Amino acid sequence: MTGDWAADLLLGGVILVGASVQRLAGVGFALVAVPALVLLLGPAEGVALSNCAAGAISAIGLATEWRQVRLVAMLPLVIAAGCTVPVGALVAARLPAPVLLIGMGTLVSAAVLLVMRGVRVPALRGAKGALAAGAASGFMNSSAGVGGPAVSLYAVNAGWTVREFVPNAQFYGVVVNAFSLMAKGLPQLTAPAWLLAGAGIAAGVVAGTALAERVPESRARRIVLLLALAGGLATAGKGLAGR
C-alpha cells in the first residue's frame, strides 16, 4: 500500500500536518492524523503507520529534552501500557472494519472532548492513577492509535505544567509506540509511500517548530483539538455508513 501516487502524496500531507501540530502544540499528531490515515489505508495499516510516525516525532523531540524526563513518575505508566498494548492489538485484529472505525472515531471524539473540558478525576492521581492512565493509554494506542489523551488527563490531574508534560509525553510516546509496533508489526507500504511519510515527518517538524514561535500555545491546542474532533466524527460516520 498504497501504490497510487495521489494517495501517497495525500498520505505524506496528512503526516506533515500531524507532525506540524505535534511540534506546535506538544501533542496532537495521532488525534489529527489517525482518522485521515485510517480512511486512506484502513484501520490496521492506518494505526500502524500512526504508531511509526508518532514514535519518530516523539524521538526527535526527546533528543533535546531527555534530561527533563521524570523516569520514576513515568515507570507506572509505561509498565501498565506494556500490559495492555497486546490486548488492544488483539481486539483490533478481531473486530470487523466498520465496527473498528466506529470504535476509533468514538474513542477519538470522546478523548478530545474530555481533554477540551480539562476533566478532573481524583482516581487519576498518584501511583494508582498512573497505572489506570497507562493501562487505558496502552490499549487505546495499539487498537486505535490514540494513547495520548489518557496520559494528558493524568498529567492534568497530577498538576503537571506544560513544561513538565512535553518531555515526559515524548518519552512515553517513544516507548508506547514501540510496544504497539512490536505487538502488531510495521505497516505494509510501498517504497514511495515510506519516502513521502518520512518527508512529511521532516517537513512537519521544521514547519511546526517555526510556527511555534508565532502561534500562542493555547490557540494551537484549540486548533488541534477541533481538527481531531472533526476527524473522529468523520471516521465514526464512515464506519456507520459501511455497516
Image (tube, rainbow, N blue to C red):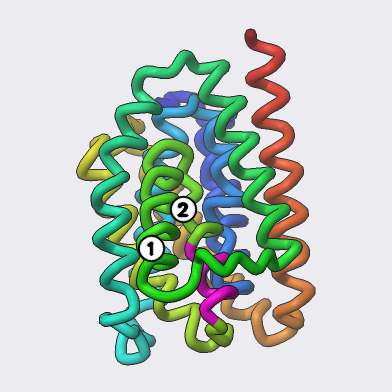
Q: Is residue 101 left or right of residue 241?
A: left
> Is residue 5 visible to us here?
yes
Q: Is residue 9 left or right of residue 231?
A: left
Secondary structure at numbered mark 1: helix
Please state which of residues 121 and 11 is positioned toward the viewer in this rendering.
121
Q: Position of residue 149 (x, y in %)?
A: 55, 58
Q: Residue at x 51, y 64 (%)?
A: 123
Q: Position of residue 30 (x, y in %)?
A: 53, 52
Q: Is residue 211 left or right of residue 34?
A: right
Mark sitting on residue 173:
1
Which circle's residue, 2 or 1, is located before the other in the chain? 2
130 lies above or below 177:
below
Report which residue position mark 2 lands on: 147
Q: Residues within 10 Å of mark 2 (few under 14, many from 20)?
A: many
Q: Residue at x 73, y 35 (%)?
A: 233
Q: Main secondary structure of the magenta part?
A: helix
Q: Amino acid at mark 2?
A: Gly
Residue 219, by quadrant, is bottom right
> Is residue 195 visible to us here?
no
Q: Quadrant of the C terminus?
A: top right
Q: Is residue 75 left or right of residue 105?
A: left
Q: Position of residue 129 (x, y in %)?
A: 44, 66
Secondary structure at numbered mark 2: loop
The residue range painted magenta reads 151-158
Residue 55, by quadrant, is bottom left
Q: Quadrant of the N terminus?
A: top left
Q: Residues within 10 Å of mark 1 (few under 14, many from 20)?
A: many
Q: Residue at x 48, y 73 (%)?
A: 125
Q: Residue at x 49, y 25 (%)?
A: 42
Tell me whether the residue at label 2 lies in contact with that at label 1, contact meaning CB atoms closer than 8 angstroms: yes
211 lies above or below 67:
above
Q: Count the marks.
A: 2
